[in-house]
Amino acid sequence: MSLFSNVLSQARMRMVQAGAALVAAAFVAGCGNSYRPVITPINPTGPASQPISYAVVVSSPSANAPGVATVLDYSGDSILTQAPIGPNPTAFTLDANGANGFTVNSDHTLTNFQVSSSEPQEKDIHYSTLPVTAQTVGLFSPTAGLWAPDLTGNVVDVLSTNGSAEAFKLAIPVGTTPISVVGLGSLGQHIYSISQDVPFDVTCNNAPTSVSQVGEADAMEVSSFTVSARIPLGKCPVYAISSTDGRRVFVLNRGSDTVTVINSLNNTLDQCTPFLNQNGQTVTCHPSLPLSTAAGLTGTNVPAVAGPVYGEYIAATQQLVIADYDGGTITLIDVSLDEYGNDSQTFGTTFTIPVGHNPASVTALADGSRAYTADQADSTVHVVNLTSHTVEKTLNVSGHPRTVVSTSNSLFGKVYVSSPDSTFLTIIRTDQDIVDTVVLIEGNLVDVRVTSQTAVKGNANITSRIPGGGQPCYLPGVTPSLTACQNIHP
């Protein structure tokens, strides 16, 4: 090899080494500047966000002062908003979506307010004037419109709702003494007016079992606002419940201790099967489910007089849970249907469970596992296991409770308890069945509702209640009546 070639080869070697050194230096000095590996980030996996759910309370500070609508947050048990409404509200309900609240007030007005977490705006609270002679005793707001039973003229007043003041559309003549309206309210579904056919605020409140006249359900067509059928009920019907699919309507007859079942698909009394009475005798087919029979429970668990006043339909288990005011019990009834929409073979199976004195209402968790009662005379809530049919716990609450409602989300549920002689709303946690907190509300509580029981599905139980006419209230030393119940103030 020549001297020139050797020198050239060594020069090339030095150039290669220098280049490698430069690359290495650049890699060390600028690591990651020229090349970044692709990395897929892993987001933290925590509990799902809680669905929006509100509890809405209507209260009355005094007979002449404006009532108050209070919206509470489910998650924090805190008051989100308060809004003034009409004076001395007597009936309250939410619409099917939980977006609007409606009250009947003592000055013959209706109030419509929005349910939200934002501060109330004056433009969001609307008033509609009713005739001076009107005696509205309830409210029902399904998917469209507002329906109000009116004792004056024995009619159901239908009002349109479009986000502003309700506009009167027409009055539908129904049976004597209409006290409740129930149904889904969509086209193709019937809405039923429940009438007692006895004078309001007299016998059905004070002596319901002495009544001889049966009530009546009038099927009202949403498309034509006409009555298409008149269906006989039991004595002193006081409340009605629709199944979430709208195929059955259940009417509670306080005077007869029965539940009338209406097949709303064919608009007639539901089919029924013979049952055994307390003496073991077979009774012929009756259009109502008897509350005095019990499956698996006998003896002292079956009251001589039950007096059903309030109930809920449990969609998860296809059962009714009913508060028996006069019997101090709750009744659990199987109302399941088969694949063809007919009553199942276990339809009507009944369990009677003793609770406190005078349960004025009852609510069940969405999964059908437990029920909670509002024991008016005892100032307690009984927690009932609906599988074993036993009482698990008894909790003390403020006042003499009249309403108990429940809501739930992915973690746990809450139960809200209101008393007409108290300014405190009791909130119960259902994961531990303890009193979570007590919230001070402005004025005595008229009623409480939740925007949705499951915080996902719509609210099917949207029929309001009003004290009197068989629906109890509490006033020390005074027999329950419409006048007495509407004047419970500090």
Image (spheres, rainbow, N blue to C red):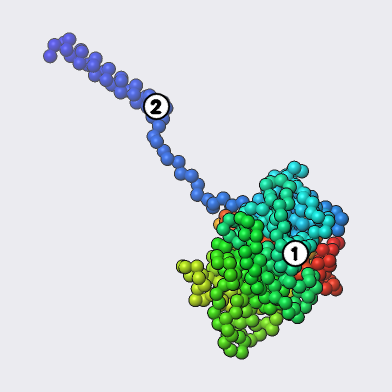
Toward the viewer: 390 or 340?
A: 340
| Image-based side of 345 in relation to 67, left or right | left
Instruction: Give x and y (percent) for residue 121.
Output: 74, 43
Cα–Cα gap, marks 2 and 1: 84 Å
The quadrant of the rendering that contains the C terminus is: bottom right
Q: Position of residue 474 (x, y in %)?
A: 79, 69
The answer to whether residue 365 is above or below residue 4 is below
Name the foreground residue: 207 vs 329. 207
Q: Position of residue 166 (x, y in %)?
A: 72, 50
Q: Nearer the viewer, residue 19 or 187?
A: 187
Q: Decide which of tag 2 and tag 1 comes sooner along the chain.
A: 2
Instruction: Name the residue nearer the viewer: 126 or 272.
Output: 272
Is 227 positioned to the left or the right of 446 in the image?
left
Point 45% across, 41% down: residue:
41
What is the quadrant of residue 437 in the picture? bottom right
Instruction: Say if residue 57 shows up in the picture.
Output: no
In the rendered image, which residue does mark 2 sit on? 34
Residue at the image position 79 percent from the left and 51 percent from the top: 129
Viewed as shown, does residue 187 lie left or right of 252?
Answer: left
Q: Residue at x 64, y 81 (%)?
A: 292
Q: Quadrant of the N terminus?
A: top left
- Amino acid under disc 1: Asn
Label 1 Cα neighbours within 10 Å, binned few <14 / some 14-19 / many ≥20 = many
- The circle drawn on residue 225 is none
Tell me, yes or no, whether the two marked residues, 2 and 1, touch with CB atoms within 8 Å.
no
- Element type where label 1 sits in the image: loop
**Horizontal and vertical percent position of residue 287:** 60, 76
Where residue 299 sits, quadrant-wise, is: bottom right
Which residue was labeled with disc 1? 154
The residue lying furthest to the top in this view is: 4
Given the image, on which type of amino acid does mark 2 rest?
Answer: Ser
Residue located 50% across and 70% down the image: 342
